[in-house]
């Protein structure tokens, strides 16, 4: 199954035909768009959520299900030449690229590399920290209201390492994060085997159990339940095409299956399609796309994984889901609409079978999705430059599920004139006109 969001909202419960006008239109029914709609609604705004597919069927459908409170340092471009050279061989499960796409993606990669210098990475870390710190509390409020507690586990996740040297280096990195107040448990090989007996074959030298994050057993269903909460509170979830958005003298208008809809404010929360729409209104955004795959497996009888486990040495995640054990890949740089290439998933599967008996795959073909990434490793949240009433909330990269509700709150506070819970300046959509030193 291939995702190229946004798609159709068919099959979801419908409100009656909309009025001609609401206070705000939110384009995109992924976790970020749904969260934004809920926060605007809670502040007294009438809101319509527009997409061409059901909520949660785009990028929000296919992730490792981590509400990643411990991910305080963004995913940076590697700076060590040895690491870059290894990835250049294009044999890794953590990163793959299509050589034909390199010329297209090169400007984004150069900016990404510059923003990943130690100085700039520290800036990105400080910028993302308020959203990450708010992630659990913002999700918890939605989960309680949406009756979604059955989808959550509060037992953290585990980072596993294959060699003693890798494990020792990871422990040093954990020590460097002590100031963030994160709770961890260091597991040597024997302790890890006791926690995860199904992976007790001896290939893991040690692991770090991150205790603060929560995990989701069905990220798509979580987004759908948030959307149903939005509808239950009077919001409208409508089928429509974001490409029809137009600016008039007084408002923003979009075509829906129920007719044209107008609002004073429009929010672009389209994930990987956001850059295209922004460009249509003269706002170029350096949005890069990282493709990613997942496939589910039916574990044999008696084989059970109790936590989500990241094989840090190889670069994949094993995540227990309602539909089976989900294997997710790292990054693929290829054209967003290029056919799926299963070699990266196959590499990850071979290495995963060294640690656990995966059993048989449950899908004939893997799922493919698109991660929307800005080169400075933080989203665009706030007003669109030079377009009154147009707002952005996209570019969350690997952390859309984690910080979607927090970024939705921040944008809703900005749109309604509240004092934002954190300084929105780091997420300013006009920041890419400024020069960045490597």
Image (tube, rainbow, N blue to C red):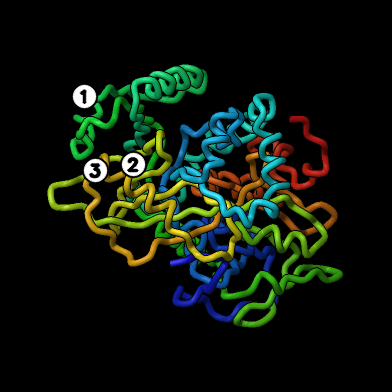
Identify the residue shown where x is 63% and y is 40%. Answer: 377
Q: Which quadrant of the figure has residue 198?
A: top left
Identify the residue shown where x is 72% and y is 50%. Answer: 286
Q: Quick one: 40 or 334, which is closer to the camera?
A: 334
Q: Which residue is mark 2?
A: 308
Task: Tell me the distance, in whole angstroms, between the alpha carbons under discs 3 and 2.
Answer: 13 Å
Identify the disc placed on residue 190: 1
Element type at mark 1: helix
Left or right, residue 306 beside residue 69:
left
Of the two numbered discs 3 and 2 in the rendering, the one whose residue sits closer to the viewer: 3
Q: Which quadrant of the figure has residue 424?
A: top right
Give the image location of residue 200, x and y in percent. 20, 33
Q: In this picture, is 395 found above or below 165?
A: below
Crowding at dot 2, Cα within 10 Å, few <14 / some 14-19 / many 20+, comes out as many
Task: Tell me the distance, in whole angstroms, between the alpha carbons under discs 2 and 1.
Answer: 18 Å
Left or right, residue 298 beside residue 90:
left
Of the two numbered discs 2 and 1 in the rendering, the one whose residue sits closer to the viewer: 1
Give the image location of residue 421, x and y in percent. 63, 37
Task: Tell me the distance, in whole angstroms, between the alpha carbons under discs 1 and 3.
Answer: 16 Å
Element type at mark 3: loop
Q: Quick one: 314 or 227, which is closer to the camera?
A: 314
Q: Which residue is mark 3?
A: 356
Left or right, residue 24 beside residue 301:
right
Give the image location of residue 303, x and y in percent. 17, 46
Instruction: Identify the residue at the far front of this view.
Output: 89
Q: In this picture, is 132 found above or below 166?
A: below
């Amino acid at each position: 199954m291939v995702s190229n969001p946004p798609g159709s909202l068919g099959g979801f419960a419908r409100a009656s035909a909309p009025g001609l006008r609401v206070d705000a239109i939110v384009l995109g029914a992924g976790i970020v768009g749904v969260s934004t709609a809920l926060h605007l609604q809670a502040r007294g705004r009438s809101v319509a959520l527009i997409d061409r597919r059901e909520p949660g069927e785009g990028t929000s459908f296919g992730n490792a299900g981590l509400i990643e409170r411990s991910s305080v340092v963004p995913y940076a471009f590697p700076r060590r030449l040895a690491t870059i050279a290894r990835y250049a061989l294009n044999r890794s499960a953590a990163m793959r690229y299509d050589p034909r796409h390199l010329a297209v993606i090169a400007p984004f990669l150069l900016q990404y590399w510059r923003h990943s210098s130690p100085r700039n990475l520290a800036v990105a870390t400080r910028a993302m920290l308020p959203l990450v710190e708010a992630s659990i509390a913002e999700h918890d409020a939605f989960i309680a209201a949406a009756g979604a507690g059955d989808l959550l586990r509060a037992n953290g996740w585990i980072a596993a390492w294959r060699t003693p040297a890798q494990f020792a280096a990871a422990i040093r990195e954990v020590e460097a994060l002590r100031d963030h107040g994160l709770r961890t448990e260091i597991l040597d090989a024997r302790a890890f085997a006791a926690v995860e007996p199904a992976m007790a074959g001896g290939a893991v030298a040690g692991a770090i159990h991150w205790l603060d994050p929560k995990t989701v057993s069905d990220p798509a269903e979580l987004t759908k339940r948030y959307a149903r909460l939005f509808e239950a509170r009077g919001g409208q979830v409508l089928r429509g095409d974001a490409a029809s958005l137009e600016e008039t003298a007084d408002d923003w208008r979009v075509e829906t299956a129920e007719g044209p809809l107008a609002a004073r404010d429009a929010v672009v929360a389209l994930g990987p399609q956001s850059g295209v729409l922004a460009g249509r209104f003269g706002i170029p955004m350096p949005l890069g796309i990282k493709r990613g795959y997942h496939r589910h497996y039916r574990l044999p009888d008696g084989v059970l994984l109790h936590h989500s486990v990241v094989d840090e040495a190889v670069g994949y995640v094993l995540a227990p889901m309602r539909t089976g054990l989900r294997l997710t890949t790292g990054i693929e740089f290829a054209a967003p609409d290029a056919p799926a290439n299963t070699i990266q998933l196959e590499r990850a599967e071979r290495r995963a079978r060294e640690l656990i008996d995966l059993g048989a795959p449950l899908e004939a073909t893997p799922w493919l999705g698109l991660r929307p990434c800005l080169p400075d490793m933080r989203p665009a949240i706030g007003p669109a430059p030079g377009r009154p009433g147009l707002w952005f909330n996209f570019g969350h990269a690997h952390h859309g599920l984690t910080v979607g509700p927090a970024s939705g709150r921040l944008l809703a506070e900005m749109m309604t004139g509240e004092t934002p819970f954190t300084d929105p300046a780091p997420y300013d959509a006009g920041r890419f006109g400024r020069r960045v030193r490597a």
